[in-house]
Amino acid sequence: MAEILCIESSGKNCSVAWSSNGCAIFTKERVDEQYSHAEELHGFIECTLKESGRKPDAVAVSKGPGSYTGLRIGVSTAKGLSFSWNIPLIGVGTIDAMALSIARRFPGFDKIVVMIDARRMEVYAGFFDGAGRSLSGIRAAVLNESFFNGFETNEKILLCGDGAAKAFSLTAGRNVSIKSLFPSATMLAEPAEKKYSVERFENLAYFEPYYMKDFLPGQAKDTLSEIK
């Protein structure tokens, strides 16, 4: 069992949570369209530490994909805290953490698609079964008519994340629900605890955010055909 300070800054939600035994005990967060994470993050961390009354056993940080600036702020802050406190750093994939948390909150779906807004008609996307287990790697995708290739028409699908609403026009004739959720530090609690228990820690000297590749308009893959 571990007490972990969790930091999420990959999107518009600047979020800090205190995790105990894989559960978020309390959280400080704010959604800001202007991405003012540099001003908010340290204050949230100070408040969280005061409420906890102790130094954490590890620091967990959302490592992306997501906003370039947001990821740099979160990861550099987490690395600095880990170094100064001499405690482990745990990196957690943003989309994987969202999928696991969402599968717990919204059971009963055949597939879960997590979509992080990447502007225009582009998203960072991950495809999961109803239990939050990955069906394919995380990828940059252009939202077009081929995005849902590979899905059966009778499957119950949950689209979630702040990029999910952009895919609504592509879902005609499918059994689809949409949850426009932001990444949150509370979503890091369970995967961070699992990594802590097996000592899957990051190397402070070399750890960097997962920025992902650039988009290539007009070259989107038949996204779900690789899952079968």
Image (tube, rainbow, N blue to C red):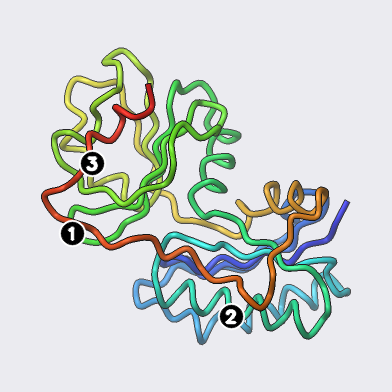
Given residues 222 and 194, the one toward you in this image is: 222
Residue assigned mark 2:
76
Q: Which of marks 2 and 1 is in front?
A: 2
Secondary structure under tag 3 reads helix
Dot 3 amino acid type: Ala
Given residues 34 and 83, the one toward you in this image is: 83
User: Can you give x and y, in whole percent of width and height, for residue 81 in the image?
Assistant: 72, 80
Residue assigned mark 1:
120
In the image, farthest residue toward the top? 154
At a point 78% along the width and 85% down the height, the residue shown is 84
* Side (left or right) of 60 relative to 169: right
**Are dots 2 and 3 in contact, CB under 8 Å?**
no
Q: In this view, does 135 lie above or below 79?
A: above
Q: Label for residue 61?
A: none
* Side (left or right) of 9 relative to 92: left
**Are dots 3 and 1 in contact, CB under 8 Å?**
no
Q: Is residue 74 above or below residue 98?
A: below
Q: Which of marks 2 and 3 is nearer the N terminus?
A: 2
User: Can you give x and y, in whole percent of width and height, for residue 103 in the image?
Assistant: 55, 33
Q: Residues within 10 Å of mark 2 (few under 14, many from 20)?
A: some
Q: In whole angstroms, how far apart are the C-alphas of marks 2 and 1? A: 28 Å
At a point 41% along the width and 72% down the height, the residue shown is 32
Residue assigned mark 3:
167
At a point 16% along the width and 37% down the height, the residue shown is 169
Q: How crowded is mark 3: few (under 14 residues within 10 Å), some or many (20 or more)?
A: some
Q: In whole angstroms, how far apart are the C-alphas of marks 3 and 1? A: 12 Å
User: Can you give x and y, in whole percent of width and height, for residue 214 in the image?
Assistant: 27, 62
Given residues 66 and 33, the one toward you in this image is: 66
Q: In this view, does 46 lie above or below 19?
A: below
Q: Earlier in the sequence, mark 3 or mark 1?
A: 1
